[in-house]
Amino acid sequence: MKTVIIGGVAGGMAAATRLRRLDETAEIVVFEAGRYVSFSNCGLPYFIGGVIEDRGKLLSHSPESFRTRFQIDVNLEHEVVSIDPAAKEVTVRNSAGDSVHAYDQLIIATGALANNPDVLQSDRTSSLRTIDDMDRIHATLNEPSTRSVVVIGGGYIGLEAAENIRRRSFTTTLVQRGPRIFPALDPEMVAALHDELIAHGVTVITGRQVRTVESATVTLDDGTELEADLIIDATGVAPASAVAENAGLRIGDSGGIWVDAQHRTSDPFIFAVGDAAEKTDAITGLPTLVALAGLANRHGRATADVIAGTTEDAVPALGTSIIGVFGITAAATGWNETRLREGNRPHRIIHIHPPSHASYYPGASPLAMKLLIDPSTDLILGAQVVGRDGVDKRIDVLSVAISAGITASALKNLELAYAPQYGSAKDPINLAGYVAENTAPGQMRTVQWHELDALSRTGSTILDVRTTEEFDKSHIPGAINIPLDEIRDRADEIPDGDVIVHCQVGQRGNTATRILAQTGHTVANLDGGYLTWHAGI
Ligand code: FAD
């Protein structure tokens, strides 16, 4: 049996090597349009920034190594220009011309293509998708005349590019069309990332689009002119699905190649994996696009299993992802609040700000954690974690909890490794469980940071229960201050009617809320306290 694979990076090579391990007799042929096989595209920004010094570390494989170890025939600079599903053949183009190759099974792992909007086209513009892109950017940065770089797009690749370019002391400007960078996070969660970029000297411009690129000047839609010796186009990607579409394969509404749970396209002998193919969304069960390396690898491997005769369905995708920018790490899994609201999906929210590990042990720093929870089932719909330390393990636990169907309140029961330098006896994950339980429907009422303004305008009292020193430093406009330890004695100072209590992060507010509720007040706690409110405004 002959399996042809289009695309020789994450999904394609995961499929190829797994298939060989399962079947010594299979004929496996890979056509890769580019000049490199199985390169580490996630490492590209870090070579530009000098974090990875040895370029060869991104290129640990070659056609020869795949032939020697796996008997896989890898053909570089061979582009598949068409597929004939009826004849079970592909037409391949290289410098010698076109050739036709038969297959028994075909795997499409063509990845994604940079959007490359016309307005950004110039000889100073480069996307960052391939080794060639990386080499071009690296060479430009090494030219003595290069001083200023403008990165267009504030998603993962834009942020990683901006960080690494700024790391080398270039004047770096990040331009984002939307109202905030990194839309995987909700507005109040993104503030730390934004501030970190600015603290390290990156100029961040949001809510602006590029009007023109001329010579070394990027002009924005408000007339701002930015000097740009180099422009990085990080405006996003789209599935590289044209070769599949032209072959008559079904394309989903997302623009990705439609596949069933076993990665089979609308043709039974053709499979598709990775960024080019749709995934099943874990929250809705509907098709979606998720361009992440882990899924491409996993689905490539699973496709080989299917071809070899196993029939295991793909686990739906949560889109669990993480980014580090200078000292801040931000991570997300599942759906964020913005998306849940747009989809009219009922949800409740908790924010907590625990220390990353025991606060008495050196090096602890605050985490910001947000959970989105289904109010009727208590299942976790999404989570976000931002901080300087311990973000990665918390997001991974939450991702596993979602996949395993562990409810938000049941997080309190998870038995997590603890010593003071790693966590707390009540780990942030356990704390999230406590707060989820405390604020479940019918328990303590909470309000969100973005509801406060309207509530205060309609007459609710905002009661700050932090210390007078904390209050004097900064406080929510219109708030009155009665420190928690005085609240029992001074409860008669609180006006009648609705009271919104808050402290710095929500914990003292919880205690005050319970005291006041038992003295007959109509009371709610501001979720996440002053910190979340301040990050959101
Ligand atoms: P790719 O790895 O993109 O490979 C597709 C290959 O197909 C390409 O080499 C292309 O040349 C080839 N091809 C396309 N069309 C044809 C054709 N017609 N004929 C022959 N060959 C063809 N993901 C993460 O999870 N974490 C990260 O930190 C992360 N960082 C990233 C950083 C950068 C700079 C980039 C670019 C991506 C990053 N990603 C990250 C995303 C991740 O790399 C992709 O999700 C993953 O590589 C997708 O795998 P794939 O096999 O679908 O496509």
Image (cartoon, rainbow, N blue to C red):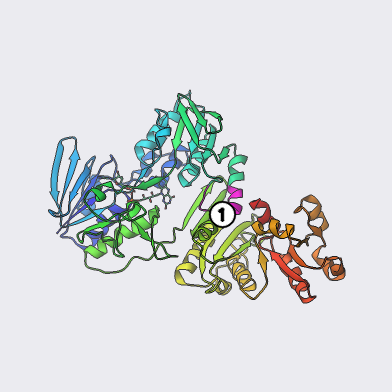
245 with respect to 216 (left or right)? left
Viewer-closest of 227 and 210: 210
Q: Is residue 383 above or below residue 203?
A: below
Instruction: Tell me which segment is drawn in magenta.
Output: 182-193
Q: Is residue 156 visible?
A: yes
Viewer-closest of 446 and 111: 446
Q: Percent from the top left, x then y, of residue 520?
A: 79, 75
Q: Is residue 264 above or below residue 404?
A: above
Q: Percent from the top left, x then y, of residue 474?
A: 77, 51
Residue 309 magenta-drawn? Answer: no
Picture quarter containing residue 201? top right
Residue lying furthest front in this view? Answer: 458
Q: Is residue 388 visible?
A: no
Q: Which residue is mark 1?
A: 186
Q: Is residue 451 above or below residue 214?
A: below
The three-letter code of the residue at mark 1 reads Asp
Residue drawn at (56%, 33%) of the image: 222
Residue drawn at (61%, 57%) of the image: 368
Q: Percent from the top left, x then y, of residue 86?
A: 14, 55
